[in-house]
Amino acid sequence: MGNHQLRNRLLTLACIGGLFLFLWWAESNLDAYKIRLLNLSAIYIILAVSYNLINGVTGQFSLEPNAFIAIGAYTSSLLTMSVAEKEMTFIIEPLIWPLNAISIPFFPSLLIAGTV
C-alpha cells in the first residue's frame, strides 16, 4: 500500500469518526426540528450521490435511484410502525402475517431496508 492510499484511508476514517462524533453531539444538543433537517439533508445527499454515479460517471439517464429509495423507505416504515398503527393505517386490506406483527427499532429496519 502506497503513501497516498494510507493517507486516504486515514482521512476517510477520521471523517467517519468526526461524523459519528457530530451525530452523537447533535442528538443531545439540538432540537427535533434541526435533527429533522439533518435527516432530510442526509437523504438528499444520498440521492444526489446516486444521481452523480448514474448520470455523471456512466453518462446514462436513469430514474432507478428514486425507485430504490422509495422501496427502502416503504420497507423501513412498515418495519418501524407499531402494530396499532398498522391496524389503523391498513383498514380495508390488512397486512400479511409477518409484517402485521413486527415492530423493530429504526437502525435494524434501516439495515433490512438496505438489503431489500
Image: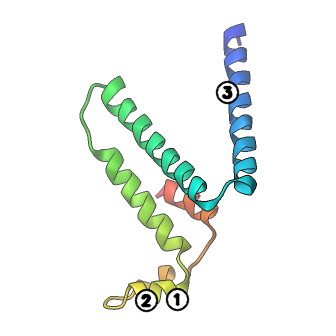
**Residue occupying image coordinates x 56% and y 79%:** 102
Q: Amino acid at mark 3?
A: Thr
> Seen in the image, is 90 located left or right of residue 24?
left
Q: Amino acid at mark 2?
A: Met
> Residue under circle 3?
12
Label ID, residue 84: 1
**Residue occupying image coordinates x 36% and y 91%:** 91
**Residue occupying image coordinates x 33% and y 49%:** 66
Q: Residues within 10 Å of mark 2 (few under 14, many from 20)?
A: few
Query: In x, y percent, where is residue 54?
Result: 34, 33
Query: In x, y percent, where is residue 103?
Result: 58, 77
Q: Is residue 54 above or below residue 66?
A: above
> Seen in the image, is 86 located left or right of residue 26?
left
Whether the residues at callouts 2 and 3 have beta carbons within 8 Å, the answer is no
Where does the N terminus fall, quadrant-wise? top right
Instruction: Report whether residue 2 is seen.
Output: no
> Residue under circle 2?
88
Kindly report which numbered mark, 2 or 3, lies closer to the viewer in this rendering: 2
Residue at disc 2, secondary structure:
helix
Q: Is residue 104 above or below residue 82?
A: above
Q: Is residue 93 above or below residue 35?
A: below
Query: In x, y percent, where is residue 40?
Result: 49, 51
For marks 3 and 1, the one nearer the N-term is 3
Between 1 and 51, the one nearer to me in the picture: 51
